[in-house]
Image: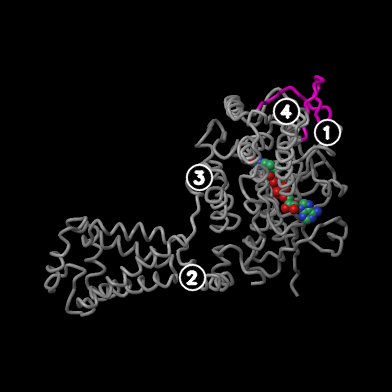
Amino acid sequence: MADIKRIVILGGGYGGVHAAKLLNKKYKKNDNVEITLIDKKPYHTLLTEIHEVAGNRIEPDGVQVSFDKIFSGKRVKVVIDNITSIDFDNRVLTSEDYTYSYDYLVMGTGSEPAYFGVPGVEENGFTLWSLEDALKIKEHIINMFEKASVERDKKKREAMLTFIVAGAGFTGMEMAGELAEFKKKLCFDYKIKEYEVKLMVVEAMDNILPILNEKLQKKSVAYLWRKGVKILTNSAITEVSENAITLKNGSVIPTKTLIWTCGVQNNGFATSLGLSSGRANRNKVNEYMQSVDHANVYIVGDNCHYEETSGSAIPQIVETALQTAEAAVKNIVADIAGKEKEAFKSNYHGFMVSLGSKYAVAQFGNISLSGFLATIMKHLVNLHYLLGVAGLNAMWAYIAHEFFDTRENRSLLGGHLSRKSHTIWLVLLRVFIGTMWLLEGVKKVKDGWLNPDNIYIIQVSGVTGATEQAETVAEALLSSPPAIYTWFMETFIERYAFLFQASVVLMEIAIGLALIAGLFTFLASLGSIFLCVNFILSAMAGVEIFWYIFGSIALMGGAGRAFGLDYYVMPWIKKIWNKTIIAKKTYLYIDEPTVGA
Ligand SMILES: Cc1cc2nc3c(=O)[nH]c(=O)nc-3n(C[C@H](O)[C@H](O)[C@H](O)COP(=O)(O)OP(=O)(O)OC[C@H]3O[C@@H](n4cnc5c(N)ncnc54)[C@H](O)[C@@H]3O)c2cc1C
C-alpha cells in the first residue's frame, strides 16, 4: 500500500483556508495525500469586516463564509473541533474528545487582544477580535442607549452615552467610523439628542494610523472629526473601571464603553504549545515557514514570527497570512516530492482603512486614495479575495450584504440599492406581460409565421413576405437593421430562416405561458428582453417595446415567487442543483450547498 501523507491544517482563517485551497489544487488527483482542515467554528470569518457587524451595518452572516461552501466538492475534509493540545513528538492533535494524527501540520490559529498589563481592561473593556466580540459590542451599545433614554441622573446618562475606542490603528479607526454612523439611528430610536453622545478615539502614540502616510492620517482625522469623533493622541490609558477610564495625565473620562483595539498577540492556544517564541509570543519560523522547533510543523499568518529583514518581524495582516500560507504549501509539496524548498518572500501591496460605509483611505506604495475611490478599492479587494475563497457565490453574498441589504442607507451608494418591495406588487405586471407575449405569439401563428413559405423575420431575397413586413414597421425605432446585425443574420441565420422564425414564435408563446404561470420567471424575463433587443435590431420594433424591456427587468427580481409556480418549484430545483457536480465545482450554489451532498 502506498505511503499516505496526512496534512492537517489547524485554523480556517485567512492563512488556513488559503493553504487548504492550494493543497487541494495541488493534490486533487492524488489519493496518497489526505488534507484535513480543523477549525472550532463551521465558518471562515472575514475578520477584517467585523467592525461592520459591531456597528450594525451588516448582519453577522455578512462576515461568515461556511466551510461547506468553500470546500464542498473539494478533497479537503473539514472537521469542526476545538484543539486543546498538540503532541509534536507523536504528531497528534488533541481536542476534548478526539485525536488527529498528522505527517505535516500547518498551524494558523490567529491572534488575540493584548492588554499590556493595563489594569481593568480585561474585566471592563470590550475587544474586537472575533464575531462574538463584535456582537457583544453591538448589543452593549444598543443597551446603553436604551438605558440612557430613561436615565435622569445627568452624570450617569453622560457616562452611558460616552463611547471610547482605545487605539488608533486600523481596527480602532474602522470601529470609530462605524460608531459615528450607528449613533444616528440609535439617537432617533431612543429619542436622544445627537450632541449628547460623545465618541472618542484615545491613542497612546502621537499619531494615528501609523501604517499610512501623513496626508491620509490628516484626512482620516478630519473626516472623523466632521462625523463627531474626537481623537485624543498622546493619551495612554492607565486604568479602566466599570464607569470610567483614566489617562496618563490623570484625567478621568466617565464611560461605560471602552473598546480596546490597542494591540494583539499570539493566541493563547498557540502560545501554550511551548514553541520558541518571538515578539508578542508568536511562534518562530525559519524562511520556509517551518517551526524552528519541528520541521514538519509549518506556521502561518498571525501565529508566526519571522524576521525577513533583521530586527523587523513581518506584520499581522491578511497579506502575510496568505503569503506565508503559500510558502508553507510550496515547501510541504517540495518536501513530499523530495525537492528543494523555497524561501518566503513578502510582497505587500498596501493598506485600506474604511471609516464607515462611505469613506475610506488607502495607500498602495506611493499612491494615496481617499473617499469614494478608496472605498471602491476596498470593496474590489474584498471581492477579489472572496472570488478565490468561494467563487461567484461568495462575491454575490458580499455584494448583497454591502449594497442590497444594508440599513439606514449605509453603503457607498446610499440606500438606492437596499430599498425592498414585495414581489406581490409584480404579480399583475407579470401576468400582463405574459399575456401580451402569448397574444403576440398566437397572432403570429394565425398570420402564418409557422408556414415555411412565409418568411417575415428576415429579408431573404426572393421570398414573399419580406416586403410586407417592411411595411408593417414604418414606426420602427431603427429605419434599417445595423450593418453588423445584417451581417450576422446573413452569415448564420439566413439559411435557417424558417427555423429562426418558428423559434421566435414558439419562444413568444413559451415566455408568455411561463410568465403567466410564474414559472422560471427569471429565465422567461431574460428571454423577453432578448427577443425585444432582437426586434429592435431587426428594425421591427417601435418605441412601445421598451414597456416589455423595463417590465421584464422588474420581473427578474423574483416575480414568480408570489402567486406563481416558482414559489414551489425553486426550492426543489435549488435542492437538486446544489447537489450537482457542476454546482460544487463552480461554487454556483444557490445560497448554501445541500448538507451531506
Ligand atoms: C477588526 C479587524 C480589522 C482588521 N482589518 C485588517 C485590514 O484591514 N487589513 C489586514 O490586512 N488585516 C486586518 N486585520 C488583521 C487580519 O484579520 C489578521 O491578520 C488575519 O485574520 C490573520 O489570519 P490568520 O489566518 O492568521 O488567523 P485568523 O483569520 O484569525 O483565523 C484563525 C482561525 O483559527 C481558528 N482557531 C483558533 N484556535 C483554534 C483551535 N484551538 N482549534 C481550532 N480552531 C482554532 C479560529 O476559529 C479561526 O478560524 C484586521 C483584524 C481585525 C480583528
Left or right for 256, reference 334: right
* Camera-side residue of 205 and 574: 574
Task: Kindly identify which residue carries mark 2.
Answer: 566
The range drawn in magenta is 230-256
Query: Where is 222 relative to 55, above or below?
Result: above
Give the amino acid type for the residue marked by disc 1 in the picture. Phe
Task: Kindly identify which residue carries mark 4.
Answer: 202
Cβ atoms at labels 2 and 1 below 8 Å apart: no
Give how far apart the Cα atoms at labels 2 and 1 are: 58 Å
Cβ atoms at labels 1 and 4 below 8 Å apart: no
Element under disc 1: loop
Give how far apart the Cα atoms at labels 4 and 2 are: 54 Å
Q: Quadrant of residue 527?
A: bottom left
* Camera-side residue of 141 and 285: 141
Cβ atoms at labels 3 and 2 below 8 Å apart: no
* Camera-side residue of 561 and 30: 561
Return the disc, 2 or 1, that comes first in the chain's sequence.
1
Q: Please identify, in this view, whether the residue under mark 1 or under mark 4 is nearer the observer.
A: 4
- Mark 4 residue's CB less than 8 Å from ligand 1: no
Q: Position of residue 597 (x, y in %)?
A: 64, 72
Query: Where is 279 relative to 523, above or below?
Result: above
Q: Quadrant of residue 502?
A: bottom left
